[in-house]
Amino acid sequence: MSDRESITVTVQRGGPETPQYPQEFEVPAFESQTVLDVVSWIQQNVDPTLTYRFACRVGMCGSCAMMVNGVPRWTCRTHVNKVLKGGKIEVGPLRNLPVIKDLAADMDPFFDKWVAAEGRHHPTLSRDDAIAEIDPEQAQRKEASLGIECINCSICYSACDTVAGDSDYLGPAALQRAWTLYNDGQDADKDAILDAVSGKGGCHSCHSMGSCTAYCPNGLDPLSAIAGLKRATTQRFFRGRAK
């Protein structure tokens, strides 16, 4: 056990058909206890109807992301002793997404925006062609590699105030994915990517506040990716005007 006997956990309950409300639980305190451990203890020992989402428990899948004291975090990697305030913590569903129930957010809008941002590979070869060689030292390839560790946890999306104020905004994860593909030498339709990210809700809607980069658990930099898209779309615009 830790120095404390218990901690007070306030959990946001409810969903689309039930008004959301806070509920307090007293949870035994242990050493090296994570926020996910706390939520699991409540569900296993007090209220089996508590709804939340997790999978790997080791910071690889991102599915356990929640708001902890108002900050989006992976709960499996967030130790209670790092976020405890006066013996209390508050846990809620991710911000900027619809709530399915309790701590489980609906990820569909997040992934829909990946599709809208052309966040898919446009192949240059078929399966019958030889596999293309890729030079990892190529400058453009290095730029593409900066964002490939994104695991779609939606932490950046939930941290983004532009998303909060503009439901059309594609969001940092989708735009970072678009930038990754734009810099992929094997992608065949860079114009489609720039078309997708230059319209309403695209990269130019970003206010460059940097919360996406500040809160990314994998240390990625969506803000710089979005800046890259702003440059690329602007350069294409002026090249078109010069013709």
Image: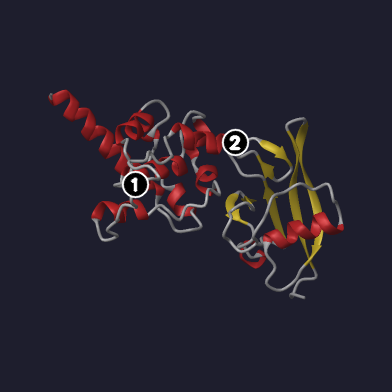
Q: Quadrant of the C terminus?
A: top left
- The residue located at (76%, 58%) in the rendering is 40
Element assignment for label 1: loop
Question: Which residue is more in the foreground, 185 or 31?
Answer: 185
Residue 226 versus residue 75 in the image, above or below:
above
- The residue located at (49%, 30%) in the rendering is 166
- The residue located at (54%, 38%) in the rendering is 110
- The residue located at (50%, 32%) in the rendering is 165
- The answer to whether 185 appears left or right of 40 in the picture is left
Look at mark 1 in the image and give the residue it sits on. Answer: 129
Q: How many marks?
A: 2
Instruction: Single out the residue that lies furthest toward the left.
Output: 243
Residue 67 versus residue 122 in the image, above or below:
below
Q: Residues within 10 Å of mark 2 (few under 14, many from 20)?
A: few
Q: Residues within 10 Å of mark 1 (few under 14, many from 20)?
A: few
Instruction: Single out the residue that lies furthest toward the right.
Output: 46
Residue 66, horizontal then vertical, whole percent: 63, 50
Location of residue 96 (image quadrant): top right
Q: CA distance from mark 1 to mark 2?
A: 34 Å
Question: Which residue is more in the foreground, 182 or 158?
Answer: 182
Q: Quadrant of the N terminus?
A: bottom right
- The answer to whether 56 appears left or right of 2 in the picture is left
Mark closer to the chain start, 1 or 2: 2
Residue 233, horizontal then vertical, whole percent: 28, 34
- The answer to whether 27 appears left or right of 189 in the picture is right
Q: Tell me the kind of residue under disc 2.
A: Asp
Which of label 1 and label 2 is nearer to you?
A: 1
Q: Tell me the kind of residue under disc 1.
A: Asp
Look at mark 2 in the image and give the residue it sits on. Answer: 108
Element assignment for label 2: helix
